[in-house]
Image: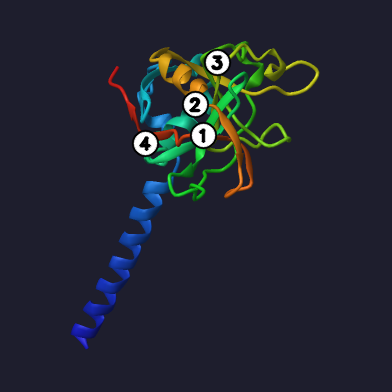
Amino acid sequence: MLQRTFGLLLLIFITLFTHFSTSANEIPRGEYIQTDNLFPKVKMVTNLGDMIIELDRSRAKITVDNFLSYVVTKKYDNTIFHRLEPEFVLQGGGYTTDIEQIKEFPEIINESGNGLKNNQFTISMARQYEPHTATSQFFFNLVDNDSLNPGKKWGYTVFGEVVEGQSVLEKAIEIGSDFSEELGWPNFPNKKIEIISVQILSE
């Protein structure tokens, strides 16, 4: 009887431990990363080279914390840029190298009225038509995109900029894009552009 009770308790403990361990890895926790640093930096390692991106918590705290949540849980590692419009944007953060959608955290509010503009080499959140629908996907502005800034309608939230490695984006532009017959997607890069890893840099 005692052995059976012990076995049952052990099973319950293992089940709870597995549940909470898995949950802990999935909980967004960007707000706990370098909490006193308003301008955390990340290193994005791609197959075209590395970029250093300075994020701006002072203007887009919710968006930066959301982005860091994906970084710290390594959801951006081994993903691709699936959209390239050379005179517009380079977009990624949604699909693995096997073209599988990554698991997303809940949608966040739109912070596009923060004063930051969708200028060349800035990073912004992608979203659906509705304003508060951003999750994991982001894009780099390859030119100054005034049409993406807020006006009478909600804009697209800028939350940082590339401070080193802008040449990576210039290399991406040279690759070009076309309609993918296999995927049925427009503006798919002619050569796979991979995000190998995204790492949070020390303060």
**Looking at this rendering, what residue extends furthest in the bottom direction?**
1
Q: Check residue 72 in the rendering and tell me which mark sits there, or answer none.
A: 4
Earlier sequence position, callout 3 versus callout 1: 3
- Look at label 4 and name its amino acid: Val
Earlier sequence position, callout 4 versus callout 3: 3
The colouring scheme, among rainbow, by chain, secondary structure or one colour, is rainbow
**Residue occupied by mark 1:** 190
Q: Are marks 4 and 3 in contact (CB under 8 Å)?
A: no
**Mark 2 neighbour class, 10 Å CA radius: few under 14, some 14 to 19, many 20 or more:** some
Task: Look at the image and tell me whether residue 29 can be seen.
Answer: no
Alpha-carbon distance for marks 1 and 4?
30 Å
Earlier sequence position, callout 3 versus callout 2: 3
**Residue occupied by mark 3:** 59
Callout 3: helix, strand or loop? helix
Q: Check residue 43 in the rendering and tell me which mark sits there, or answer none.
A: none
x and y percent of residue 34 in the render?
A: 35, 23
- Look at label 2 and name its amino acid: Ile
Earlier sequence position, callout 1 versus callout 4: 4
Alpha-carbon distance for marks 4 and 3?
21 Å
